[in-house]
Image (tube, grey):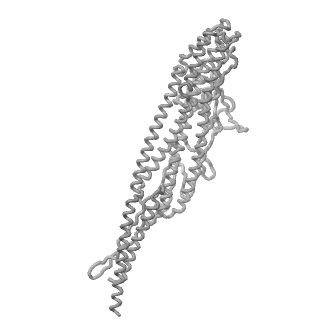
């Protein structure tokens, strides 16, 4: 065996040990970097040299530097973190919603009980104007609490819209970075030596992206069927968000109706297409959309139903009496009107207004028929001359609806051009009732405490007003029962959301810990390896020194 082979083998061994030392050092200094995966030098035995005595080894060579990676666990991390982010975002908002409802003496239940108690006091002293002022004050206090709760719900709604826009902006920033890395990684998929640090950076960005919106990841393949080093990301059941080095920007579309609603859209080739919000379930955006599209409308409708039915119940009875001056009683409480929200994609006239006009009004005296729900109006597919209304809270469908039809205590009036196929109107008979709750009178003398056939100083109607405290006009319940159930249902929803958030967070943490233990850096292990690699280097250097001595001896003999 020639000394040149010995020297080359020693140098190769020193280079291998040096690569191992450098990689271990790289692992150690990046141990605290998010998304970094442990790297390892893969060594290979060099082919031996054939001699008359057999094959003599020629040492070792560095084959490649691999990163520790688990594709399955990596996918699990993305999925579980996305779900945890969605559950956490929704739970936080539900907690804020629950806090909007005052409890105890600050709640709607207490304010309503105080109003009915004041009716009882009024029945005992119908001519006492100071008692009448107390009743008026209780009306104002109750309506103020309805307004305050409604306003807090709307403030929460506005902050949710703003947060959705902020989250979408973050998504676009992350996808741009991922596309840039895709450009750098293009063509590396089939290479033996992979740019490990760039791959880690891209994986970490995808993890961060999944915390904002749920994405599916597909390894891109070239014409030869082999991975080309880039990945494609899809959202909302298949809409491309990142394709190689290209991105499609996500946007937020705010409806023009009241209340405004945010939905997602994606831009491709200059064209913006709406995304199905129902298919965006993960990430903080998924939680925000669910809260906006499910939880807030339900809370708004339940609160509005209480306000609208209470006002109708009291006003209907109040109109049966006479005030202190002998006049027939009018409304005692005033609440927000029923509203209609046309879809942004409805057919428009030459002035940009909806070609079909829809109005709804609550029917006086039919408050007990009102439901805590919005409704959707569209053309009846079975009868082009009629319309179809769907109660969104339970999916009940009313077919063959014509203009002037009354459903669940509200009347629908339709005018203008015939409704085009695909047109949609959201009917909100009670959603805005609480926000605009007011006392309808400012003079205590106008309170109709007396019966219609008695003198203005009688108390017959005050007794009937007080008796309304047990009237089952709220979907078959009294106000106290209906309010208690609303608060209890919200409390249960918050508890479930908290449980979901806790469970999904624990699952995400467990998977993250699992992949970290498998692919992350253990400083103690790296320190031990560093000592081993240092010894390998020293031994290789010793072999080189010995080889040099042999070479010098040979030269001396030859001389």
Looking at the picture, tell me which residue is in the foreground, 279 or 155: 155
| Residue 105 location (% of width, % of height) | 55, 24
Q: Is residue 79 above or below residue 121?
A: below
Look at the image and tell me whether residue 421 can be seen. Answer: no
The quadrant of the picture occupied by the C terminus is bottom left
Instruction: Tell which residue pokes out farthest to the bottom in this image.
Output: 559
Residue 556 is at least partly visible in this image: yes
Front one among 465 and 47: 465
Point out the residue furthest to the front here.
Answer: 130
Q: Residue furthest left?
A: 53
Q: Residue furthest right?
A: 351
Horizontal side of residue 4 vs 406, given as left or right: left
Using the image, determine if residue 384 lies above or below residue 541: above
Residue at the image point whose x is 54% and y is 44% from the top: 285
Q: Nearer the viewer, residue 128 or 280?
A: 128
Instruction: Identify the residue at image location x=37%, y=64%.
Output: 529
Q: Is residue 499 above or below residue 134?
A: below
Q: Where residue 334 appears, x then y in whole percent?
A: 65, 23
Image quadrant in which you'd find residue 369: top right
Query: Which residue does the image show at 55% across and 42% down from the upper left?
Result: 276
Q: Quadrant of the N terminus?
A: bottom left
Position in image of residue 137 (x %, y %): 64, 20
Residue in the foreground of this view, choosing between 236 and 372: 372
Tag count: 0
Measuring from the top left, give residue 104's x and y in whole percent. Answer: 53, 25
Q: In which image quadrant can residue 347 be found?
A: top right
């Amino acid at each position: 065996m020639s000394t040149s082979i010995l020297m080359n083998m020693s140098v190769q061994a020193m280079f291998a040990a040096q690569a191992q030392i450098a990689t271990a050092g790289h692992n150690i200094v990046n141990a605290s970097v998010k998304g970094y995966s442990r790297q390892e030098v893969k060594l290979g035995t060099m082919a031996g040299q054939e001699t008359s005595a057999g094959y003599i080894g020629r040492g070792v060579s560095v084959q490649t530097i691999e990163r520790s990676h688990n594709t399955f666990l990596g996918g699990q991390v993305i999925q579980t973190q996305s779900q945890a982010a969605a559950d956490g975002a929704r739970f936080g908002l539900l907690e804020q919603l629950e806090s909007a409802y005052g409890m105890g003496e600050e709640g709607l239940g207490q304010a309503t009980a105080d109003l009915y108690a004041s009716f009882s006091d009024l029945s005992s002293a119908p001519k006492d104007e100071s008692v009448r002022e107390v009743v008026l004050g209780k009306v104002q206090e109750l309506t103020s609490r309805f307004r305050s709760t409604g306003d807090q719900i709307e403030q929460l709604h506005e902050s949710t819209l703003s947060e959705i826009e902020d989250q979408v902006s973050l998504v676009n920033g992350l996808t741009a970075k991922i596309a840039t890395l895709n450009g750098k990684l293009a063509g590396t998929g089939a290479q033996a030596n992979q740019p490990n640090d760039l791959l880690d950076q891209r994986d970490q960005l995808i993890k961060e992206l999944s915390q904002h919106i749920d994405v599916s990841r597909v390894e891109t393949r070239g014409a030869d069927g082999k991975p080309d080093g880039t990945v494609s990301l899809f959202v909302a059941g298949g809409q491309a968000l990142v394709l190689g080095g290209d991105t499609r920007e996500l946007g937020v579309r705010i409806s023009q109706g009241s209340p405004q609603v945010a939905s997602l859209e994606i831009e491709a080739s200059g064209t913006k297409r709406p995304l199905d919000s129902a298919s965006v379930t993960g990430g903080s955006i998924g939680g925000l959309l669910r809260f906006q599209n499910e939880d807030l409308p339900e809370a708004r409708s339940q609160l509005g139903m209480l306000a609208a039915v209470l006002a109708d119940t009291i006003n209907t009875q109040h109109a049966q009496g006479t005030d202190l001056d002998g006049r027939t009683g009018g409304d005692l409480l005033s609440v927000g009107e029923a509203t209609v929200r046309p879809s942004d994609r409805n057919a428009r006239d030459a002035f940009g207004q909806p070609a079909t006009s829809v109005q709804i009004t609550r029917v006086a005296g039919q408050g007990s028929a009102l439901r805590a729900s919005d409704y959707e109006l569209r053309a009846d597919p079975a009868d082009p001359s009629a319309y179809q209304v769907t109660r969104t809270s339970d999916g009940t469908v009313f077919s063959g609806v014509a203009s002037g039809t009354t459903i669940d205590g509200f009347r629908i009036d339709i005018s203008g051009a015939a409704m085009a196929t695909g047109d949609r109107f959201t009917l909100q008979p009670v959603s805005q009732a609480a926000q605009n709750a007011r006392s309808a009178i400012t003079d205590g003398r106008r309170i109709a405490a007396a019966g219609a056939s008695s003198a203005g100083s009688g108390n017959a109607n005050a007794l009937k007003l007080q008796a309304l405290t047990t009237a089952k006009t709220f979907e078959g319940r009294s106000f106290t029962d209906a309010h208690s159930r609303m608060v209890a249902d919200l409390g249960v929803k918050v508890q479930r959301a908290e449980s979901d958030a806790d469970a999904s967070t624990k699952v995400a943490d467990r998977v993250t810990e699992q992949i970290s233990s498998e692919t992350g850096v253990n400083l103690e292990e790296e320190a031990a390896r560093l000592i081993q690699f240092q010894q390998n280097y020293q031994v290789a250097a010793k072999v080189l020194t010995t080889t040099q001595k042999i070479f010098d001896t040979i030269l001396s003999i030859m001389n």
